[in-house]
Image (cartoon, rainbow, N blue to C red):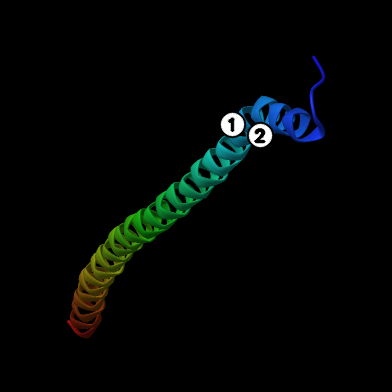
Amino acid sequence: MDISKEEKRLVLIIRYSLPIFIIFITILASILVTYEHKNNIQSEKEYIENQYIIDQKEVIKADLNRVYKYIDNKEKKTKENLQIDLRNRVNNAYSILN
């Protein structure tokens, strides 16, 4: 049984073609999965960034409202204290004159 060169070559091709094909498909599938994973991570990153920006805007808005209320309250108390002080000084002035 003498096998010719062409038959040996054909046997080698048949023997190694399936593993090579499987390796090629595996590499291709790995590349596609990696690419898809990268896209998913990028989308999730953008979503998290946008959500963080929205959350921080709300925090800043709440802080500004709190500061505004604090300043408004301080202004009202200062006005009240000034009115009381002015009233006391006027009363002192009247008492000195009488």
| Residue 82 sits above or below residue 12 on the image | below
Quadrant, the C terminus: bottom left
Looking at the rendered structure, the kind of residue marked 1 is Ile
| Residue 72 sits above or below residue 34 on the image | below
Q: x and y percent of residue 63 in the render?
A: 34, 60
Q: Which residue is mark 2?
A: 20
Hey, which quadrant is residue 5 in on the image? Answer: top right
Furthest residue in direction bottom, as rendered? 97
Furthest residue in direction front, as rendered? 1
Q: Residue at x 30, y 69 (%)?
A: 71
Count the marks: how many? 2
Badge 2 density bin: few <14, some 14–19, many ≥20, Cα 10 Å: few
Hey, which quadrant is residue 6 in on the image? Answer: top right
Q: x and y percent of residue 93 in the render?
A: 24, 82
Q: Quick one: SS at disc 1?
A: helix
Pick the residue in front: 85 or 2: 2
Pick the residue in front: 28 or 38: 28
Q: Residue at x 24, y 69 (%)?
A: 72
* Residue 13: mark in rendering: none
Hey, which quadrant is residue 81 in on the image? Answer: bottom left
Tell whether 76 sits left or right of 58.
left
Pick the residue in front: 87 or 32: 32
Pick the residue in front: 95 or 17: 17
Q: Residue at x 26, y 75 (%)?
A: 82
Q: Residue at x 37, y 54 (%)?
A: 47
Q: Which residue is mark 1?
A: 22
Real-space CA distance between mark 1 and mark 2, rounded to the nearest whole angstrom: 5 Å
| Residue 85 sits above or below residue 65 on the image | below
Label pair 1/2, CB-CB below 8 angstroms: yes
Looking at the rendered structure, the kind of residue marked 2 is Ile
Q: x and y percent of residue 2 in the render?
A: 82, 19
